[in-house]
Structure formats: structure tokens, C-alpha cells
Image (spheres, helix red, strand yellow):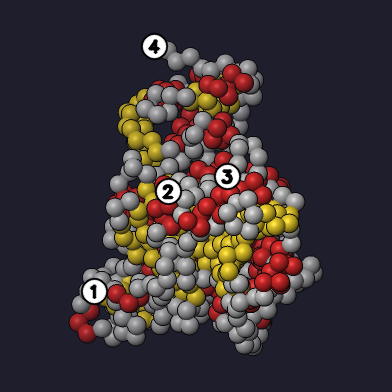
Amino acid sequence: MTPIIIPCPACGRELKIRDRKLLGRKGKCPKCEHAFLLEEPAPVELELAETSIPAEGTGARWVATPTPQPPQPAAASVPAPSPFAISAAPSILAPELTAAPLSSDVLRRKSSKGQWVKWVVVAVVLCAVGGVGIFALNTPPSKPNKSGSNHAAEDSDVAGHSPVTSGPADLTASPTKGDPIPLEMIPSGAQILVHIRPAELWQAESQGEEFRYCLGPLGEFLDQQLKAVCKKPPTEIDSALFALIANTRGTPPGLALVVRLKEEAKKSELLDMLGGTRDDTYGRPVYVNNEQAALILDLKTFAICPAKDAQDMVESIGGRAAFSSGIEEIMVKTDRDRHFTIIFEPTAVLLDEEFLAPAAARPLLRECMDWFGDDAEAVAWSFHLEQDRFFSDLVVRNKTSVRPSALQERMLEKIGLIPMELLRLVQQMKPTEVGKRKVIGRLPAMTKAFAMSTVGSTGSRHAEFITPLPERAAPNLALGVLLAWDESTRTKFSDKPAAGGSEEPKSNIPVAERLKKKIDIDFRRSPLQDAIAYIADETKVKIDIDGDALKFAGYTKNMPQEFKMDQATGLAAIEKILKTKGQEKLCLVIDEKNSLAILMTFQAAETKKLTPHQFAP
């Protein structure tokens, strides 16, 4: 019997299974002793060119060119046995790429709008693309174990095939032992923060250098911004903390930063670099330049903030600045020695979305925040690049209305869904270059390994998700997401209609009559947009959700709906949603002229001079 080849998600070793009866059981890798569930890998259907893969190099470099490669003849589909087996060669990890931004037409395309949210989530969770963006101001798979999704695997090399119930503790042990990231010299009201260790990430011939090259134009942009904002080359900056300070509604947030240098600088050099006029009225010398204020704490540390926040900046040295409880509490879970950390409140991101992303990207940013759900008060994600390990740590602080264990279970399920969504989308892509095909084709397997390696745990007010992977995971995940994103701009996706709508032809039957069709309802914490999409599909009525109206009322499309109704009309189901406690501000507007229904708020309906539907007593 031909053995089944299953790669270890931790070290990549290929395990040979000769007896299919062993599938579904637990064991461990004989090489690294990593525990995972024994599952037959699903092949990724891709058309590979018949040319041989170019020879590998020794370092990744970004090469941008607007000239596409000519199409190459296709060969049979080839499964990828090892998710992170791609090596850092210029020919594979940095193929020639048309680094075109995602156009607004692509973002608005109905067939892909709802699904590309997953790409954004992957980017945020796997390779810090979301962090770079914020800094720039710009039936599901098997349910994961509640204690984590680090399943065990077994192999014919494991004596007796005895199951293993837990993995080695050192795999999830933190690679750093630093203190929490200090908020010293950050003015009050910071709700989005990014902490980075430039000197280590920009070190020549390091994992950080390779990771940055694999981010392509994003890596280059980050390099330029660090030099411009921090006023020093990245190699001279030990750490930099950026903070977006909330302002009055409708005005952009202010940017504050604290820079810590590797070596002491001369006082005269710092003064020349920061400029401004000295002002001693704040209790410490502050150098004000136009609308910006700077503070020199010592010869290695300086801070910059909006001039109006100068007093807060000085007072925060003594710990008197005010921050939300979510930010203050989750900062305790951070580690200043990690290479990259982003901390944010999803609600704050949604409120300032118009200043954080261009108009075409705002729907994606909004859905990305909704991915964390209404249960998340604050989020902190960090990663660290070791010599032999990529370490990811996601901490989500729950709201008081939800138990940490429930939040943990939901987040693990969401992480587990990402590979399936990516596989379906990747199968529709047809990259012409063999290098791109190889990297993009392995992205679903890589994210599957990420999901399977994630270990969940809970505290009194948070859920934490640690993912230890081989060091190859960092550059390959970064490049895989980047190439897939780029390829998406040339792919026409054909799929089911966007959530909340229906692609059925218009009917002569009035919308109100079609909504009287009797259907069965069984919503089990289903997101609002999914519940509405189900009702729309069953009644053959196009139902839109006014996301902006919901946002201004403090609602999201991810609000959980949980009720059951047998043979109830679509109108009765919608009425049940509208009368759910906490959702009373919502209403339904029926637009017979355009043959659709709209879910919005009473306030929005009044503003737009629309008449909410009156449900029968």
C-alpha cells in the first residue's frame, strides 16, 4: 500500500502513514515531538508550468517590474507535501511582481468583496500588513479543542501509535522575557499603538531582513516612513512606539511616538534633529516646532507629539496620563522585546476608519475589525523571529458580557476557517510564473499549519492564542499573502453572491409579499450579516445592510443572532431580530421601486426620509 505523506506542521518532516485506519488519531512527530492530529492533506489544484524551478539563491530581494510573464503551458496539479518547504531564493521568494495596488473596482466586485476580508485577516494575523497600514495612517472544519488547536499526530515511526495528549511545553514558551511596553511619554487617549524593534529587524543577513524583503513594497514603505518620522535610520533605532491619539469626532487622530536609540547621541545632535523653540512652562524642557512638540528624556530617548498634547506627554513620565481600561490592561500582556506588536481597540479603529485607510479599502478594514466580533474590547498581537522559530502571540481582551472561554472557542473556530476560504480562492487563480504558482499554491497549507499549531488559553479577562512555527513560516507567509493579494487584482472570482443579497432575477411579486414566505430558522450565534443573507436567499429578496448607519448607532454586522423558528415568515424572522434586546434601534425599509429591502436604524431612515416597515400586531 502506498504510504500517506503527512508533513509535521512544526518542523516540516514528512511522516509516512501506511495504515489509513490511523487517520484521526493522535501522536507526535518523532523528530521534534510536536503534537498534532493525523489528517490526510488535501491537494491544492494549481496549474504548474512544465519548466524546471530555477536554482535557489541565498537571500531574498524584492524585484518589481510592470511587465507580466508570458503564459506557460500547464501541467498536472501537484500537491504540496510540506507547507513551509519553500526556501528563500530570489527566483521563488521574490519573483518579478507587478506591485499594483488593489483597485476600487476590484474592491467593489460583488463576487469577491465579502471573501477578501479573509485576506486582510490573514495579513493582520500572519505578517503584520495590517499593522503597517495603521502605522501609515492610511459547515466549517472540525471544531478545535477548547484548550487549543495544537493537535497531535502519529506516524509509523512512533512505537505502538500511542496517542499524545499534549505537545512539548517549550514550543509555546515565550522567546522573550521583556517588561510590558511602557506608555511613558505617550499622551492620554491613545487607542491604537504599534511597537517595533527596527535595529534587529533591519540587521543584515537576519531573519528580519528576509521578512522585510518578502513584504515587497510594504517593506520598502515601512523603511521610508521610519526614516522620515523617527528622523534616524532603522539600524540606529532600538525601539519605536507609535500611538494614534483620539481627537474629537470627525477629525483625524494625532500621531505621537517614542524613539529609543541603540547608542547615545550628542545633545546638540538631538536638538538640531528635532528643532523647535524651547519652552520650559511644562515642568521639563519641551521643543515646540509649528504644531509639533518634542521632549528629550535622555541621550538615547526622545518623544514627539502634537503641540496641544505637550502637557500630557510630560505628565505621562510620572504615570499620570489617562488611557482606556482596555488599553491599560492589555498592555500588561505585551513584551517590549518582541520584534513587532500592535495594540488596538476595534471600536476605535471603526470610529476613525476614514482617516486610517483610503475610501476603497475601508470596507475591508471594517470587516477586519468585525472579524474580532463584538466580544473583543482590545487586541494585542505580536510576533518574534528566532533563529529556528516564528512565534506569534495574539491576546484578545473580552468584554464583561462574554466569558473568556467562549471568546477563545469562537476565535479558534474563525482561525480554523481561514485555510478553507483561501483554498477556494487560490484554486481560481492562474499565475503565469512558476515561482508564484508554487508560493500561492502552498498558502492554504501554510495557513492550515498555522491554525493547527495555534494553542489557546484564557485568563480572568482575556483569551490568548500562541502559534509556534518553523522560522521558514515568517517569510513564506508574508510572501504568500503578498503574491496572492497581487494576483487577486487580475483574477475574476466567480462565487456565491455577497452576504446580505440575492442574485435571483427580479420578481413581479412585491418585496413585502415575498418576505411572507415561510421558512425554518435556526440561528446559533450567527452573525447578523449571515442571518440576513440566509433570510434573503430563502425568500429570494435582495436585503442590504446599511453598515454606516449601524456603525453610528454602535452596532456591527457581526452581532450574534440566536433563536429558532419553525415555518415562520421572513418578515417574522426579521422582526425577531429587530426586537432582540439591544437591537431596538434597527428597522426595516422596503423599497418596492428598486425591489429590495434595507436594514438600517430609525435615525438613518429619518435622515434619509424613508419610511420604516410597520409590522403587523
The secondary element bearing badge 3 is classed as loop
Q: Residue at x 38, y 35 (%)?
A: 561
Q: Earlier in the sequence, mark 4 or mark 1?
A: 1
Q: Position of residue 281 (x, y in %)?
A: 63, 50
Q: Earlier in the sequence, mark 3 or mark 4?
A: 3
In the image, 151: left or right of 230?
A: left
- Per the rendering, the mark at residue 326 is 2
Residue 545 visible to an observer of this rendering: no
Q: Residue at x 55, y 22 (%)?
A: 603
Vertical placement of 592 versus 36: above or below?
above
Reading the image, the residue beneath label 3 is 246
Q: Position of residue 31 (x, y in %)?
A: 34, 85
Q: Amino acid at mark 1?
A: Val
Cα separation, mark 3 vs mark 4, equals: 45 Å
User: Marks 3 and 1: in contact by CB < 8 Å?
Assistant: no
Q: 118 or 259, which is in the foreground? A: 259
Reading the image, the residue beneath label 4 is 617
Q: Amino acid at mark 3?
A: Ala
